[in-house]
Each structure stands twice: as structure tokens, then as C-alpha cells.
Amino acid sequence: MVVKVEEKKNVQCTLVGDAMTGKSTMAQSFMDEQHPQGYVATVFDSYAGVYELADDKFGITILDSAGQHDYESMRAGTYKESEVLVLCYSCVDRDSFDSIQDFWVPEMKHYTRKRKPVILVATQTDLRENKKKTSDVHISSEEGAELASQIGADCFLECTFMDHITVKQVFETVIISALKYRKKKVNLVQRIFGK
């Protein structure tokens, strides 16, 4: 069955972050409500579906970008096309956490001329319990919230594909962020042109 969604109710986001942080798993879990198995490196994938939020249907397109740093040219267009940018790191991979500030934010700023909503997401929280003994690797919720503040993210969330509610929360936040962003743009135009 094909569900038509009004153009203004379509939202597009891009997932960025290091390889093996769970970006593809998060997107697949959201779209299929299943737990994907195994790891397959992503060069570029997109997922599209319809999601109901507050008795309204929204089309959502998720652009899943390569996590390898040397695929920058492939990601460049996705930054420009998307309304919301979702920066992901694994809460059990300190290097992926550090890459947010050292690599992903500078790349994002380079390719986005206009301010867009940014959501920082800590993934793989189900693995955090298994790694408690190695606290130098484990990234706490507090560290994630602090990083979100430092980079100027609009929101900080944590999720695991093992808990579909946390995955849904990420993409509900994407939709809400896009709608707020659009409203701000309309208000700005109205102030400028007095309409």
C-alpha cells in the first residue's frame, strides 16, 4: 500500500559518524522495527518511509553516510540536502566520540552554509553495561550532554536498537526539529517582509 504524504510533511536527515557506530542499524531498526544482524560497511544508503506522529503522517528519508573519513566527497551533498543532521558516536568507542568534535563537526560546518538542526546521538547503549570495567572506553551520558553543549547541538539522545522506543525517539526528534526549523525560517521571512 502506498501512502501519500503532503510535500511539506516530508523530512530528510543525514546520519554521520565513524564506521561501526550503529548508524545503519539504527536506521534499519527504525524503518523495519527489526533488529538487524551483522555488520556491513556503508558507502551510502537511504531509507524512506512514513511515520505517524501526533495523528499526522510524515514522510521521512534517512541518508546513511559512510563512516570512513576518506569518503568526504560522497557526504558533501547530503549535508546540503538534509534538513536535520544526526551526529552519531558509540558510547563504548572513545575514538568515535572524539571524532565528533575533531572531524565530523568541522566537516559539517564546511558543507552547510546555513544553520540546521543538529542532534547528537550516543548509540549502542546496550553495550555500555558490558564495558563498565573499562571506563576509559565507556562514554557517560554526562559526557555526551557536555559534548552536545560544546558543539551547539539542538538535542542529545541515547539509543540502542535493542530498545525500539529509544530509536523511535531519535527520529521523532528529527521530525520535530525539522518542523521547528521550518517555522523559524517562515517567521524570519515574515519579519523581514512584514507579512
Image (spheres, grey):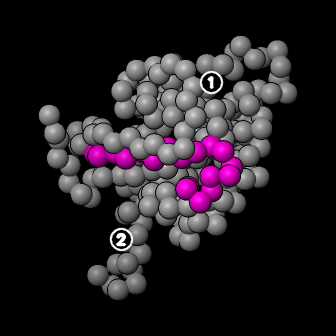
Seen in the picture, residue 86 relative to 128 is either above or below; the reply is below
Distance (Cα) linking label 2 and label 1: 37 Å
Q: 138 or 195: which is nearer to us?
A: 138
176 sits left or right of 92 in the view: left
96 sits left or right of 4 in the view: right
Q: Which residue is mark 1?
A: 125
Q: Would residue 83 be counted in the magenta stretch? A: no
The magenta-colored residue range is: 58-75
Q: 33 or 150: which is nearer to us?
A: 33
* Residue located 55% across and 55% down the image: 75
Q: Quadrant of the N terminus?
A: top left
Mark 2 residue crowding within 10 angstroms, few (<14) / some (14–19) / many (20+): few
Seen in the picture, residue 111 relative to 94 is either above or below; the reply is below
In the rendered image, residue 141, in percent from the top left (x then y), is placed at 69, 32
For mark 2, give the secondary structure.
Answer: helix
For mark 1, give the secondary structure.
Answer: helix
In the rendered image, residue 62, in percent from the top left (x then y), is placed at 42, 45
Q: Quadrant of the C terminus?
A: bottom left
* Residue located 45% across and 35% down the image: 27
Amino acid carrying label 2: it is Val
**Which-is-in-front pick, marks 2 and 1?**
1
Q: Which residue is mark 2?
A: 186
